[in-house]
Image (spheres, rainbow, N blue to C red):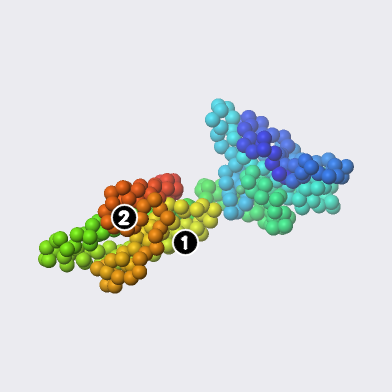
Amino acid sequence: MSIPMSDRSRIVDGDTMRPEDSDADGESSLDPSPNVRRERDDFPARVRRLLAGQAGHLCANPACQRPTTGPSRDAGRVVDLGVAAHITAASVLGPRFDSSLTSEQRKHENNGIWLCQDCGKLVDSDNSTHSVELLQEWKERAIARAERALAKGDVDPDGVRRLAREERYHTAKLALTAALQARALILRGVEVARHVRNIRRVRQSERAGLLSEAAKWYADTAASIEATEVAIRSVRVLWPEEPQVGLVGLHVRLATWRNWFSENVAIVTGAKGAHARQSNESWSWDDVFNGDESSVERMNGQVTEDLDNVEAWARPYIHGSP
Ligand SMILES: [Zn+2]
């Protein structure tokens, strides 16, 4: 039931959906034994419409539930991203083929499930996980869900999508807040560095204030490093595929900056230790500490880029607030 590329984003006339479905039962064009091929038992257009309607035009995979139809930019047309997938294959080489079924049974609505194109591809590529029983369960649950949606007049009758949206919203917000805070602390560290550098030049009476500012910065960085760690972990749970480059960058930079202070500035930590590891950036914390303007500028640019990345990623989730 793999989907030919030409079919990946099919546009059909508003009133006529394709008569047969797009699947080819995962058969390869390099099939070594073409003689084994039999007729395909494709679903008639009526069955395809029925499966789509019974599922409320949403993908039946409970973890997906993606809408499969909507307006096209071409007037008078709709986009149809759904697949009437065979629970047991339409032809002998396809996934989950059941030789005990008749041709009529194979193209009967009982043998079909409504999925989006991605899930259609998934269930046929991984047919040991996606058994006949599992697909039948998905189908039953999808139909029951569509029934509840109608009865309640709510497209999300169980609140599952709302919950997922809220979770994404809060996690994206957590990540953005952590990123903003980390960036602010990195930049404040530059100010703290300036004060520490000039400490001998200020009046005795002002020194205590500057030292406590430095100590507070040092304490705040610990909390912020922890906050970015928590955010990175939470983001990974919800978006395992998405590398959080900006957030990780800010986390690492703040941690290295703090580390640099703890190893080089006795005033902040009480004891001066060995030199901090040199980063492989185009600037060094030594230069930033010493107020080298071009280093501060390059560091600033990178930190801002990190924050921009986090913002660009988080904005869509935060924008559609729950
Ligand atoms: Zn899907």
Left or right side of 210 for 285: right
Residue 106 position (above or below residue 209) = above
Task: Specify the label residue 287 is tagged with.
Answer: 2
Instruction: Give the spatial CA distance, label 1 vs label 2.
Output: 32 Å
The answer to whether the beta carbon of the residue marked 1 is less than 8 Å from any atom of ligand 1 is: no
Residue 21 pos. (x, y %): 71, 39
In the displayed structure, 103 sits above or below 261; it is above
Of residues 25 and 269, the one drawn nearer to the viewer in this rendering:
269
Residue 231: quadrant of the picture: bottom left
What is the quadrant of the N terminus in the image? top right
Q: Is residue 246 visible?
A: yes
- Local crowd size for mark 1, using a 10 Å CA cut-off: few (<14), some (14–19), many (≥20): some
Query: From what the image shows, is residue 265 above or below residue 42?
Result: below
Residue at the spot 18% in from the left edge and 62% down from the top edge: 199
Q: Earlier in the sequence, mark 1 or mark 2?
A: 1
55 left or right of 189?
right
Tag 1 residue: 233
Residue drawn 42% across and 46% down? 312
Who is closer to the viewer here, 68 or 152?
A: 68
Q: Position of residue 6 (x, y in %)?
A: 67, 35
| Badge 2 element | helix
Disc 2 marks a residue whose amino acid type is: Asp
For the point 23% across and 62% down, which residue is it? 196
**Which amino acid does the dot numbered 1 rest on?**
Arg
The number of numbered discs placed on residues in the rendered structure image is 2
- Residue 298 position, x and y percent, is 35, 48
